[in-house]
Image (cartoon, rainbow, N blue to C red):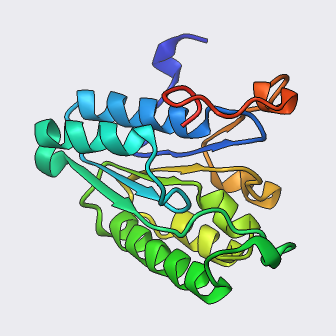
Amino acid sequence: MSFEDYKTKQSVVIVYTGEGKGKTSAALGLMSRALGNRMKVAFIQFIKYWPVSEHIFIRDISTIYKDNLYFYKGGKGFFNAKDLSDQKISTNDHLKSAKETYQKALKLVKSGQYDLVICDEINNAVHDGLLTKKDLKELITLKADKTNLCLTGRNFPSEYKNLVDILSNINKEKHHFDDKFLANKGIDF
């Protein structure tokens, strides 16, 4: 089989999931590749409201890419429905923020204004019950024909595997956190 036998898709749905480190990093690499090809990119974060290195990076490069890069930081942080005793933010605030972020992402993927929409940590929001699996399916199936979509986070629903074009399961074999070392700034966050 030669390359002449292959076709090009108008757009793809990409998922970076799994227990390993590197899902957001992969999405940032995808963002840089798209921007390098002069594509319009929207990067929507569902969980990380605290300062992380990618926020500084996106802020700095947005002066270069201007209207070709849109960033929205939604969500209220990690949510553990099994242990609400440690939550500093109410469940209602988490739910409200996730829904608002989802509506923004849905509007962007349906608009066709962006060549690539990245929904960082959306899989976590679905798994944690802040969004529904139906919400995720709607985002995938209602996207504009020419809009590429990237979904990151742990626990992507296996029943939706047939709805995506590329699915990378990033597994952890070893992580220094397991040996009681905290995350390193600039490497882990």
- State the image coordinates of residue 154 (x, y, percent, origin top left): 72, 50
- State the image coordinates of residue 174 (x, y, percent, origin top left): 83, 22
- State the image coordinates of residue 128 (x, y, percent, origin top left): 74, 69
Q: Residue visible at 78% across and 32% down?
A: 177
Q: Give the camera-side residue of 8 and 139.
A: 139
Q: In the image, is residue 26 above or below residue 155?
A: above
Q: Quadrant of residue 171?
A: top right
Q: Residue visible at 81% across and 55% down?
A: 158
- State the image coordinates of residue 110 (x, y, percent, origin top left): 37, 69
Q: Is residue 101 rendered to the left or right of residue 60? A: right
Q: Is residue 39 visible?
A: no
Q: Is residue 71 visible?
A: yes
Q: Residue visible at 43% across and 72% down?
A: 106
On the rendered image, what quadrant is the C terminus found in?
top right
Q: Quadrant of residue 155?
A: bottom right
Q: Is residue 3 rendered to the left or right of residue 182? A: left
Q: Is residue 19 rendered to the left or right of residue 55? A: right
Q: In the image, is residue 163 above or below residue 131?
A: above
The image shows a total of numbered marks equal to 0
Q: Is residue 17 rendered to the left or right of residue 120? A: right
Q: Give the camera-side residue of 100 and 84.
A: 84
On the rendered image, what quadrant is the N terminus found in?
top right
Q: In the image, is residue 178 above or below residue 75?
A: above
